[in-house]
Amino acid sequence: MAKPAGESLIRDILDRIFRGTLRAGDRLPAFDRMAEQHRMSVVSVREAIHKLRLMGLVRIRQGGGTFLVENIPSIPDILDTRKYVEAAACFLAAEHADDADFRTLDRIIEAMEDDYARRDTVAYTQQDLEFHLAIGRMSKNAILSAFLDNIQELLYYLQERTHMMQGTLQRAYRFHPTIAEALKRRDGSAAQTLIVDHIESVKKAWKALDKRKTAPGKAATKGGGSKPTKDRYGGGSDRAARPAGTVRSH
C-alpha cells in the first residue's frame, strides 16, 4: 500500500523534534520551501502540517508562519496519554466489539506472528499499529477512535524507535495475543490491565535508555559550551537543546 506523500515530512519533523535538532518555539520553513526540500507538492506539505497540528506539535500564526509549540510533550507524556486512552478503548471494545471485529483482530495477530517469525520488523511495526487502531475502532467510541487515528504517524514513529531497543519487540510480541484473548472473553478489566502493563513496559524501556544517555561520561557536551546545531529547518536557536524524548524529573 502506497504511503501518503506527506508521511516522509512528518517523520522528518518528528525525528528532528525527538532528537533535539528542532526545539520548542522553532519556526518551520515556508510551505513551498518544505515542498522543494522533500520533493512533494505544497498540498502534501499542508496535509502533513495539519496532521502535526492535530498531534499538538505545531501551531500556525495567520500570515506569520508555522512554529513548534512551546510545550512539546516528552515521550513518557505521550505514552501516558496512550495508556489512558487505550485502557478506555479496551474496556469499551470488550463490551461493544462484534464477531467481524474479532476476526479482524485475529488476522492482525496472525500477520504479526508471521512477521515476527520472519524477523520483518518494518511489517511487524505496521501490524502493531493496526492492532492498536483496531481496538480503538472496536470501542465504537468515535472520539477515542478518531484520537488514535489522528496521531497514528506519531504512534508509528515511536513504535518503530521502540522496537530498535533490545528486547522491546519480544516483550511487545507476548502482550498482543493475550490482550486479544481478553477482549474475546469480554473481560474488559483484564484487557485494561494488560494494555496498561504493555505500555508501562515500553515507558520503562525509554526511561532506561534516557538514564544511559544521561549517565556521567555519556554526554560530553552536558553542562555548557556546546554550540547550537544548525539544520535546514532553521535551527541555531541559542536556547539549550534538550531532546523532547527525554524524561523530565517530577
Image: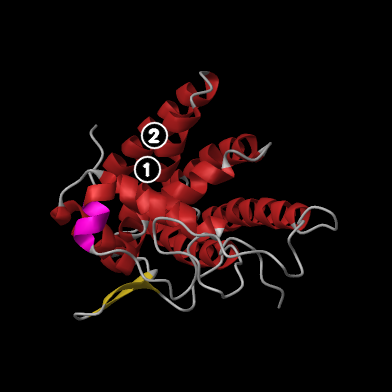
Magenta residue check for 52: no
- Does any portion of residue 123 appear in the rendered image? yes
Q: Residues within 10 Å of mark 2 (few under 14, many from 20)?
A: many
Q: CA distance from mark 2 to mark 1?
A: 7 Å
Foreground mark, 2 or 1, reads 1
Task: Tell me the quarter of the image containing the C terminus.
Answer: bottom right
The local secondary structure at tag 2 comes to: helix
Our reading of the magenta stretch's main secondary structure is: helix
Mark toward the start of the polypeptide (2 vs 1): 2
The local secondary structure at tag 1 comes to: helix
Report the front residue among 160 and 137.
Answer: 160
Report the front residue among 57 and 171.
Answer: 57
The residue wearing badge 1 is 130
Q: Residue at x 35, y 73 (%)?
A: 67
Percent of width and height locating residue 92:
39, 61
The residue wearing badge 2 is 108
Q: Residue at x 23, y 34 (%)?
A: 2
Q: Which residues are magenta?
A: 31-35
Dots 2, 1 in contact, CB < 8 A:
yes
